[in-house]
Image: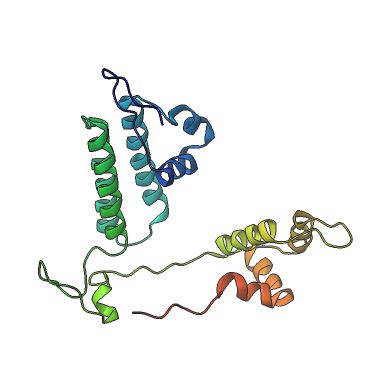
Amino acid sequence: MKTPAPNEAPRLKIPLLLEGLLHDRFGIGTMAYVHDSDSLRTWRRCIGALFDSFEKSIRDTVIGDEPHKADLREWCRLAAAWARKSESKEELVADAVANLGVLCYRLLGDQSVEDVQMGRRRGSRSHNWSLGRHRSILYASTPKQTEARIADHILETWKEDSEGTTPSQRLNHMRRGCRNASEFVERFRREYPDEFVKIFIGAAPESRS
């Protein structure tokens, strides 16, 4: 590993997982530009853009509880502003990790069912871990979203069959004759019940401990 010269600022080391997140959000072009960059200004701009992106994703994805949604978006805006004002590499990374943690906590519900005294350990009962005092997460999918999930499963996991038909061709064949997403979903459920279960039910729920 290269040792910085006495007058050389230490290289900004960004965790690999965070680099991957930035790559997924902004694409390989931007990632190639900021990867291994020594510029604090570059990373401030990039981390700020990450929270800007989260704010837009919350705007376009979260449905219901508009006051809570507004609070989430405001937190993203604040986190983006803090990132752009960071005065050191350490401050930038530490604030980004903290703000991502707070954002996750707030997305999960924001208020624990049971109050926990400072310094006291949570019990083992499952409801002690619930953040659903004010709201709960319920994942819902429209027929169009369900169709997209099936299509992605086919394209990502199915193989070319013995007759040389590709997954894409099989998908297009299934879509023929279906007037809308609901009909496609029902056709897939009827013709491939095991695959339907694999996608939407999967393994048994994990036990709480």
Give residue 10's quadrant in the image: top left
Instruction: List x then y, in percent, for residue 206.
Output: 44, 77
Task: Determine whether, in the image, residue 32 is placed left or right of residue 1.
Answer: right
Q: Quadrant of residue 114?
A: bottom left
Q: Nearer the viewer, residue 11 or 99?
A: 11
Taking the spot 48% from the left edge, 33% from the top edge, the residue there is 31
Q: Position of residue 27 (x, y in %)?
A: 51, 37
Q: Is residue 162 left or right of residue 171?
A: right
Say above or below: 74 vs 11. below
Does residue 189 appear in this view? Answer: no
Confirm whether residue 137 shows in the render: yes
Question: Foreground residue, 71 or 110?
Answer: 110
Residue 136: x and y, percent?
32, 70
Seen at 70% across and 63% down, the residue is 179
How many marks overall?
0
In this rendering, position of residue 66 left or right of residue 200: left
Q: Position of residue 148 (x, y in %)?
A: 60, 58
Q: On the picture, is 60 further left or further right than 175?
A: left
Furthest toward the top, the residue is 7
* Residue found at x 71% / y 77%: 190
